[in-house]
Image (spheres, rainbow, N blue to C red):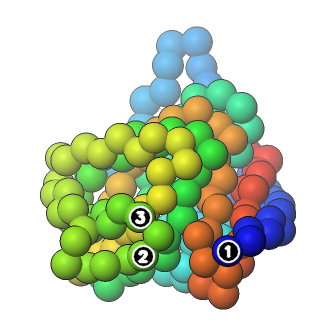
Amino acid sequence: MKKSSIVLVLAFVGAFAATAHAADEGVFINTGDLKWGDAPPVLPKGAKIAVLNGDPFKPGQYTLRLSLPANYKLPPHWHTLTENLTIVSGTVYIGMGDKAVAKDAHEVKTGGYHYLRAKQHHSASTKSATVVQVSGEGPFDIVHCHYGAMGLRYAVAASL
């Protein structure tokens, strides 16, 4: 199938600036101090995002958290760059490939870790509320495997 690419650039306006800041002594953030906001529209509704360090939408290292509600589904997609996922709470089900097949998904529980290489096709879902920490090299993007789920290609940009 011929793949087209449509680039949609999404801008955030400083909503997470108080949380994500670089300081000579490092970054110290307690759970209660996280500044959660709605995730960009490239993700299905219901997800929340908090940036812990860096700017995921620019070149360089970043760390963010995604809060996913119960029964959340992220259709098959891939990222241009690698990702490191750590499950902070709950359980995420990660399917590999171009189709989201629940019975074949890998269950990653609280404290679990998953490394996603660049361009590795995958999907994700939850059964209960789950928080996932994502870290990697920016800029973060999402390329959906199937047109119609939410679009084709999204390059996500932000000003934090």
User: Which comes before the other along the chain, label 1 or label 3?
Assistant: 1
Q: Amino acid at mark 3?
A: Gly
Establish if 141 lies above or below 54.
Answer: below
Q: Amino acid at mark 2?
A: Lys
Residue 158 at x, y percent in the picture: 76, 51
Quarter occupied by residue 127: bottom left
* Residue 97, numbered label: 3
Mark 1 lies on residue: 1
- Asked if marks 3 and 2 touch (Cβ < 8 Å), the reply is yes
Establish if 72 lies above or below 10.
Answer: below
**Residue located 31% across and 79% down the image:** 101
Q: Secondary structure at mark 2?
A: loop
Closer to the observer: label 1 or label 3?
Answer: 1
Establish if 104 lies above or below 60.
Answer: below
**Residue located 79% across and 47% down the image:** 159
Mark 2 lies on residue: 99
- Of residues 105 and 4, the one drawn nearer to the viewer in this rendering: 4
